[in-house]
Image (spheres, coloured by chain):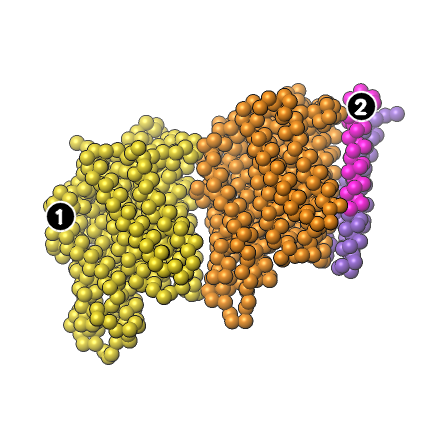
Chain colours: A yellow, B orange, C purple
Amino acid sequence: MSGNLPLAILLSSLLPGLAIFFLSEERHQLRVALNISGALLKVGLVAAALFGVWQGQHYEMSLPLVPGYPFLLRLDPLALLFVSLSAVLWLLTTIYAIGYLEESPHRSRFFGFFSLCVSATVGIAMAGNLVTLFIFYELLTLATYPLIVHRETPQAIRAGRIYLAHALGGGMVLLAGIAWLHTVAGPTEFAAAGGALDHVDAERRTDLLIAFALLVAGFGVKAALVPLHSWLPVAMVAPAPVSALLHAVAVVKAGVFGIARTVYDVFGPALAHDLGGTEILAGVAGATILWGSIQALRQDDLKRRLAYSTVSQLSYIVLGVSLFGPVATVGGLVHLVHQGVMKVTLFFGAGNLAETLGLHRVSELDGVGRRMPWTMGAFTLAALGMMSVPPLAGFVSEWHLGLGALEAGAPWALAVLLVSSLLNAAYFLPVLHRVWFRAPAGPWQEQMPRMRLETRLSLLVPPLATAALVVLFGLAAGSSLSPLAWVGLISAQEYPG
Amino acid sequence: MSDAVSAPWLMAAPVVLPLAAGLISVVLPRGRAELAVGVGALILIASSALLQTVTASGTQFMAVGGWTPPLGIGWRLDFIAALFLTVTALICLVVALFARGYLRRALPAVDERFWPPFLLLWAALAALYLSADLFNLYVALELLTLAAVMLVTLEGNGAALTGAMRYLLVALAGSAAYLLGVAFLYQGAGTLDLAQAAAGGAVPALAVALMTAGLMAKGALFPLHGWLPPAHAAAPAPGSALLSGLVVKGAFYVLLRLWFEAEPIAGTTRQILGLLGVLAIGWGALLALRQARLKLVVAYSTVAQLGYLLLIFPLAEGAWRTAALSGGLYLALSHSMAKGAMFLSAGLVLYAAGHDRIAELRGLASRAPMTLFAFALAGVTLMGLPPSGGFIAKWQLLTAALGGGQWPWAVVLLAGSLLTAGYTFRAVASTFGSAPAQRDFRTPPRSLEWLALGLALAALGIGFLAADWLPRLEAAFR
Amino acid sequence: MNGAIYGVVGIVLFAIGLYALFVRPHVLHKLIAGNVAVSGVFLVLLRSGHGAPDPVSQAMVLTGIVVAVAITGFAAALLVRMARVTGRATLGRSSGP
């Protein structure tokens, strides 16, 4: 009975997605109805699951797959963290995408694959073992490809090729890691605080370290760890809702989430730390944080600047995961949610600028705050959050990460975080200055007929909603319903006692 | 079902039905397609029933006409044979349905002539799976070759006839080598039954080497693959699907039985076969990436995919032996379906565009999205991505390689996936964009697109049967 | 009469035939070469029997001859068609079969 909930969460986007493929282009209303009802249903189901797990319920379904590895879906607190983020942002991004893609061709294909992406993401979140996770991980790669090449321009096709080469290559490394682990330790499944590998002989620790490295490298491609990150800025040719989904939710978070699962629930923090794997990982994350921020400084294209910012911000999470200790864990995992809502807001803003006024470059943004105050207001809140300005969501993450760094005895990590905040300010403040304090260079190139609002309603509601979350997650961090409280629950499980 | 009475008839059905239908179709003025489809449905039912029989009551033996081996023809039906019969029946039925709609529209001149060799090929495959001794296998292989070459010649142009001729001559050399091996084996062991010979401890290495070489020529295993791409690309698309999907795997099927029911040779020779596989994977993929025509891409991809099958030989050692073998069989089965689907969709591309030159397909994705989706989905199985049958196979082989401490083979397995992705997506990406104004694409018939997609989905779907099939495949080699 | 001679001659014929099959460019030559090779195999098969006369090896040779005749006939017809359509009786670029 309790296995039906994970399955229902998966199917609530999978079935509408498959149905949408077969709709003809003109069935606009039916497609919207399918999309929205699927997304709403998923949010409802996730809410039920959150309540159930809070109450101590156990949701799990299992089907035989390959010997030793069932197809296993399970809702644990960590899974639910990612599932909730995906479900809420999917709903908002879908609304946004419906507005964004009005009148453009191939919408059935777009929304079909869009739904498949989200299904793959929640599948990754709920997977109970590495093989199940791998199935959805590869599905995500394949389902994202048509979204990146959606516009079918030569650049889009090139970006698709680069993305596929990276993602499939990473997938193969991941598979090698899974198989290696399997031959060393036999079939395993995820368990809080690890423990599944503790029976492995001491002389096979090298094999364990190799498996750890392969797994992390495989996930690291999607998590855009330097030097595996170069697909991410290139993929910016995709339509804005795709960038928002890719960068805030689906692809990159799948990579980060995979790393978190590997450290916490495959190896367990203690063993991972003991093997020395997490130390190297923390170093890579630190380097990525700085490298991404420095690159972001140099970009004039707004979406590319945001992309490099993503590269940097993702590694906050990886850093939190790889520093040993419950507080760093809280900081890292809560950033999974906080970075998601902040970055999706920024991409919604960039999309609105492109769709409404045809603006793509930072240097073109002079005075746009007067033309689109609501959009740019939301954008500003998210950018301030990225700079960790209190009391916004980003500050909550950074505070815990910083404390965690000290707790773990890694003051260098604190220094990295502080420098990165300064760099964030250095690439976001000039944007905000142009937007609010400079005069427009000339009349705007309106891309759509003028209306009462600054742009279409469906393009305006999602960024305002996510910006509200940025504020709320910061202000109400102490409440027992906040992401922070939930992450505290996870952290207590991963570091028992 | 009381198998003592009904099983012999059931066992004969997959051979006798297509053979009879093939002979009838020669004299039938029209309605050959309908005959083939009808008989095909019956064969699929019979094959599934045989699968049930094997499941319920184990391996079945049958002496055709009551004459016992070695002079009579002995048939043996175990789980592997029943599985191959069923999958073959499924693929052949889909191909028959496809050809029925496709040839009429795309190649009306070929339409009526397609069916007799098609049905003969089906019968020969069934006889091959069932044959219990090495000489019967030879006869089945020859029938198979004959039917396959006929399929290649159908379009009657220079490329088809030359490709067919080359194929026939290589097959002739291969048969001679195989038969010489049989002669040596019979001389040395006094039996044509492999298991018996192995039990007697007398399997001459020379005999195995000759048979292996002959089968490698017929199965286009590297370096004896040169005949395959021109021949497979020259056949009409449904024929190519059969050739790439089933015929070359027929030779592989025999090779696998030869090597792993009797375990004649261990050690270095197996590593050499594995190395040939590596070369096939690399060389085939490299050429697939460079082809200008879609059907040749798919044909070279077959060369590369057959290379994976050779990797089984070094991997099936020690504790991981059955894992590698079951993986190899899974690979052969899922590739059969995927390759079939790939050639069927290539045929639809040919129909829609009037040619299959990759450089001139821009815009086709908007016109025939389902065709390209089927093509890409078949590619997913070939890449070994989950949850396809190809993934199950890759997982088995990968764990065998890593578990057995032979990690270089694992690198080959994984790198091969990326190469496969390379040529699959190169072909798919070439169809994106807007078509130039002067280009006129036809829309492929929906029903045919569904058939190609269905086969691709089946290749994907058999991944979910692994929990049932893998243990039984492993048991078959214990 | 010494049976070993069958084996030796058979293997020699097989080798000669196979060599010519690969080397000769003209398809008719290849075809004849293939038949020579197969005939060599039949000789070896004849000698492979256990206990004289072994009906199994006899049956194999007879069946083999039937198969070889069928294949040769088909190949000859194919050759005629090929020569008519392409104007050549060779396989073109590469000399291997």
- What kind of secondary structure does the magenta stretch mostly adopt? helix
Residues shaded magenta: C48-74
Q: Amino acid at mark 1?
A: Ala
Would you name the residue on which mark 2 appears?
C54
- Is residue A311 in view from this perspective? no
Viewer-proximal residue among B226 and A492? A492
Figure check: A177 above or below A85: above
The image quadrant where one finds the N terminus of chain B is: top right
Q: Amino acid at mark 2?
A: Asp
Viewer-proximal residue among B342 and A217? B342
Q: Tell me whether circle 1 and circle 2 mark residues in contact (CB < 8 Å).
A: no
Figure check: A102 above or below B420: below
Would you name the residue on which mark 1 appears?
A477
Q: Residues within 10 Å of mark 1 (few under 14, many from 20)?
A: some
Q: Residue at x 72, y 35 (%)?
A: B139
The image quadrant where one finds the C terminus of chain B is: top right
